[in-house]
Image: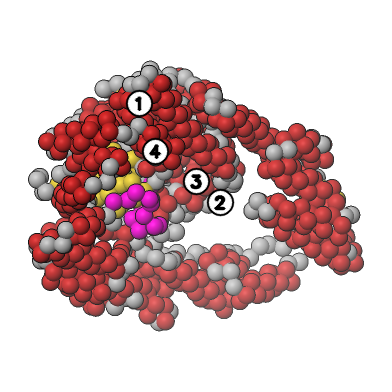
Amino acid sequence: MADEFTDSNATDAAEGSAAPPPGTLPSGTMVGKYRLVRLRGSGGQAIVYEGYDPVLERPVAIKQISNVLAVKPRFVERFRREAKILASLANAHPHIVSVYDLIEDDRGLFLVLEFVPGHSLQAVLDHQRYAMPPQTALEILWHIGGALKAAHDRGVVHRDVKPANLIVTRDYRAKITDFGVAAHAGQAESLALGTTKYMAPEVFEGQAVDVQADIYSLGFIAYEMLTGREFFDNLFTDVIRDVHSERLRWMKWHADMAQVAPPLAQVNPRVPVGLSDVVARMMAKDPRQRYARMDEVLADLRRAAGGVGQPAAPAPQAGPGQAATAPAGADLPPEPAGVETDEAPTAELPRKPFDRRKWLKRAALAAAVLAVALTVGLAVRSASQGARREQAQEAYGQALALYRNHQFAEALAAFEDVGEQFGAVELTVPSGQRRPVAQLAGARAAMARARLDLYAGRWDQALARIDHPSIRDAVGHEELADFAGEITVRRDATTALDHTAQAIAGRRLDDAQAELDRLDRLPLPTDVARRLEALQEDLADARVQAHYEGLLAGGDDAVGRNDFPAARLQYEQAQRVLDTPEVRQRIDELQGNQQLLKARTAARQAEEAGDLDAAIAAWQQAQAVRDEPAIRQRLTALRVRRHLQQADQARQAGRLADARDALRAALELDRTDALARTLAGVERALQREDLLAQADDEFRRGRYDQAVELFSQAAALEAGPDVDERIAEARFRQHWLAGDKARHQRDWEEAQAAYNRARAAKAHDAQAGRLVDNHLALLEQERTFYAHLDAARQLLAQDDYRSALREIGRAQELRATGLPIIGDEDRQLLAQARYRQEMTQAGDALAAENLRLALAHFKQARLHQDSDEVRRRIAEVEGRLSAAEP
């Protein structure tokens, strides 16, 4: 139940799932007027914090562009564009996350957003195995569809509608966020900016942005919600089988007009036909067959809502080609009370005179039985061959598993061993024909060698290895086509990266940038994408180096003209870009009496302007020319002032460690009692912050006793409502988890007491009270559910099957209401009751010598429980019936 307490606008990673990324700011840091409370998540493009607005007294979400992307103007501009788009959509729709502020300072770029308590839809889908109930899915679609319509009406297309960008609250209210790749209708954007799994087919063709692309993406999300993770992955297993090429496979699936997902009403019988048709039209690959506007979608969803809750087909249980829905209902409805199910005995069949044709048929049947017996004898003689085929199949499968796991060198050796050991043994290939193991293993060994060639950059050799009919026969055309496409993509991308590296080395930076821009639009393998990122960083370093060298050349030119102020300006700018011995030497060469005078003048002017950094730098230049006591004393005084200024700024920003370090530096220069007292106060505040951080860590680990102790120590240093709230939260969770544990152990009284203790821990929190009330109601339902099952067991022990079935039916009615019961204890008990009832009725029929009725009951019993006993009784009755036939 711990996940119920996690509120986050972060869609890339859950809180506490990994070590904080570089550049993460500590809790308590001030960003503008907002205080960072805790890290919520991080991804490839941004870091997300939970924050607090002390002016308006409300929580906020603060999204910081990642340090890696903060130096790339293109991504910074995209971040600003997201803020502008969200601002333009302000108050447009309640299901669009609101933007509050955009802050830029020396630590980076921050977007302040509405805080939405909940989870991403991606986390919800990954957490549950089965399909979402249609009513819940329809509510989410209604919220997001309305939000998209509001954006579309203002000319904005989201372009990256996916579960990770949809936040779902505890009551299944959904909001859409992350407009980082949004664009205005009619624009064409880079393909790489979106997520290929949910992209409309026309996007891959580079067409202009259109609202229909968002409709397609939302339809695909609806399909995923209403099939469920387990069945959805099985349905698209060919697409997701290889994580290295999954992105490319999704592109191929969406762009292939012949590839169409089966209708939802066939996949999941609980989805009404009307809703299934709406989703199918949203997912139409041809834009001409798809909805043109979101208001049309909403109108049809409103009409489809009338059928939600009624299954599209009367199938009560998901079969091999159907998706199960969670929570599932009972397998069979309980019988109504008072309905008799016993049937009248069947009359004896009349005897007929001898029939010659029937006798001939029986003779033919006897001959067939004899032939089967001969076949069995031959099969026994070939048992050793079958065992060897099984050994070959197992060895081949193990080698294939190594190949699928990308252990190509090990797979190559394994395939060669299999070919040598089982060369003549035949196995079945994908086409259905049988081929010798030597041929199959040889083909797979060639594929392994081709993979090794691929990763070694031997493209032509890799293509040549797979260009053989025997390989196509053993491996399959589709896998070979995918592999050939991967070779082409990797070859072209690697060649372009090599050209980029050469251009960077040759200082042809514009050419290198053009290559990188072209590659950034392609779906690249993970290792190639990492190299692309490394080259992007190399290019940025090369641009810095080129700028530095240009400034040095400008300074040298100014020196040649005896323009020393201009030369100093150029050298100092170069030093700010790269502080190297080379530029420092040039600056030293400008020193002299004239420069000393200018340095002193500049230092005094900087002091009068209050620019301590410039004043210190100027006096340092003067000291480099002439080291004298007056200059040293002045430098010391300015450095103390600068350290105190830095400490004050750091304290205001909540960076206590920086404030402590600045005060220590000042104290080393000027040891006074006032400075020592200030430093002691900062160290106490830092100790309190460390205690709070440790307590938060213990809290995240679920060790709430230790968290309360640490919070109390922090409160002893400095009390505050934030600590009191954390102590209450820790105690609340401790009792809550105890209640969950007792409920799962069916200790209902202890669970109820623990939940009430949790309520008392947060007595003034209405939301916590409602949460406790909900779980107490759930506890009562579970207690009733298991009471019905216990009553059914007692009735079964008394052979009162009809009453036992009624009790089981009542338990299953509770499960059908959405009660999250773990396991299928009720279904097993239902099957046991049905089985025992049928077996008893069969025994009564046998006692009455009604063999056919007894056989019918035994067969019905076997449908509920296929036991050795019922199979033996069926065989016994069938034997007696055969003996009784004329």
At 24% from the left and 65% from the top, the residue drawn is 690
Given contact means CB atoms under 8 Å apart, are the residues at marks 4 and 2 in contact?
no
Q: Indicate the quadrant where residue 762 lies.
A: bottom left
Q: Amino acid at mark 3?
A: Phe
Given contact means CB atoms under 8 Å apart, are the residues at marks 4 and 3 in contact?
no
Q: Which residue is mark 4?
A: 584
State the residue in front, 629 or 841.
629
Given contact means CB atoms under 8 Å apart, are the residues at marks 1 and 2 in contact?
no
Given contact means CB atoms under 8 Å apart, are the residues at marks 2 and 3 in contact?
no
Residue 567: assigned label: 1
User: Which SS class for mark 1?
Assistant: helix
Front tag of 1 and 2: 1
User: Which SS class for mark 3?
Assistant: helix
Q: Which residue is mark 2?
A: 320
Which comes before the other along the chain, label 4 or label 2? 2
Q: Is residue 153 visible?
A: yes
Front tag of 2 and 3: 3
- On screen, residue 376 above or below 482: below
Dot 1 crowding, Cα within 10 Å, few <14, some 14–19, many 20+: many
Q: Indicate the quadrant where residue 572 lies.
A: top left
Whether residue 523 appears in magenta in the rendering, the answer is no
User: Which SS class for mark 4?
Assistant: helix
Image coordinates of residue 450 in percent, x first then y, are 74, 42
At 46% from the left and 49% from the top, the residue drawn is 229
